[in-house]
Amino acid sequence: MKLSFIVGTGRCGSTLLHEILAKHEEVSFFSNFEDQHGKLGFLGKWSGKFYRNNHLALTRAGKKRFAPTEAYRLITRNVSPIYVRPYRDLTGRDLTPWMKEHFYNFFTESYKKYDKPVFIHKYTGWSRIGFFSKIFPDAKFIHIIRDGRAVANSWLQMNWWGGYEGVNNWLWGPLSEVHSQEWENSNYSYETLAGISWKILMDSYEKASEVLDQDRYLIIKYEDFLAEPVEEMKKILNFTGLEWTSDFENQFNKFNIRKSRERAFEQDLNEQQLDKLESCLSDMLIKYNYK
């Protein structure tokens, strides 16, 4: 089974790349339709065909019933809720023999059902790389990275982020002593807490990816994709064993890839808020070559 995961912190551009890649005629994926309609899930076999039909109303914006999804409900129903909202990163140590078997069987049965050469699945949040690489030792991971200021700014606008209720009620578990002190020193700034969220998740990817060989882990910076979408997409296709075909090119050209929100944090945050966020993220921004 040729299986590749598209992963990232969330609000990092992974959805756009996932939706573009799912347009390839040799790719299969879990669809929104399967995720939302358990009893009619057998129709997911044709999700790829429906999704690639640009004239079908059910694939259009606001009606993407056959678009690719992170499949949280689908996997919870068929395997386990552990995948959905863990308060820490998942590793191979979290796998029971039962769980490993059921995850493996569910993905492989879906792969056979869809009958395409490559299966692509996207998820965001914790890396879960140690978890899935233990189940699928040949799987590949495409990590989409975006400027932490843009990610944190976007989280501040999301109703699911949870940071506004404090760290006892959010998705990322208790803060370390260092992060607790950092948040306290910022006078409990929400901008700082959003920045800490990004750092926590990025640390999980860095640590977990150490178990992967170079040919199983690809980093794509979202900003590079916006600047050179064709070249970056060709990197992804080559990494997953796919080719840039004329059919895919026609599908690719239908996407409106815009750079207008690339640095929206400079307008969405005031000077003091941006200073706090950049103070929180400075070392990691430098590490990933962000100005």
Image (tube, rainbow, N blue to C red):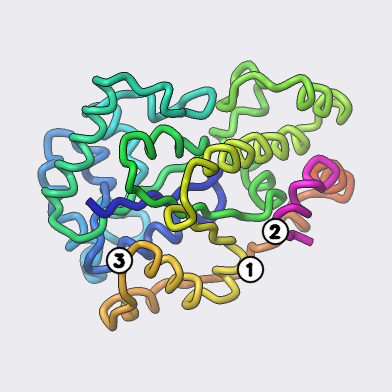
Q: Secondary structure at mark 3?
A: loop
| Residue that carries the numbered disc 3 in the rendered image | 23
Q: Which residues are magenta?
A: 278-291
Q: Is residue 125 left or right of residue 138?
A: right
| Residue that carries the numbered disc 1 in the rendered image | 260
Q: Secondary structure at mark 1?
A: loop
Separation of residues labelled 3 and 1 (CA atoms): 24 Å
Query: Mark 2 near mark 1, Cβ–Cβ under 8 Å?
Result: yes
| Residue that carries the numbered disc 2 in the rendered image | 264
Q: Which residue is located at x 56 percent, y 35 percent?
A: 159
- Horizontal and vertical percent position of residue 166: 68, 21
Q: Which residue is located at x 26 percent, y 47 percent?
A: 30
- Looking at the image, is mark 3 or mark 2 nearer the viewer? 3
Q: In the rendered structure, which amino acid carries the disc numbered 1?
A: Ser
- Horizontal and vertical percent position of residue 138: 32, 48
Query: Mark 3 near mark 1, Cβ–Cβ under 8 Å?
Result: no
Residue 101 quadrant: top left
Q: Is residue 140 or residue 54 the one in the foreground?
A: 140
Q: In the rendered structure, which amino acid carries the disc numbered 3?
A: Lys
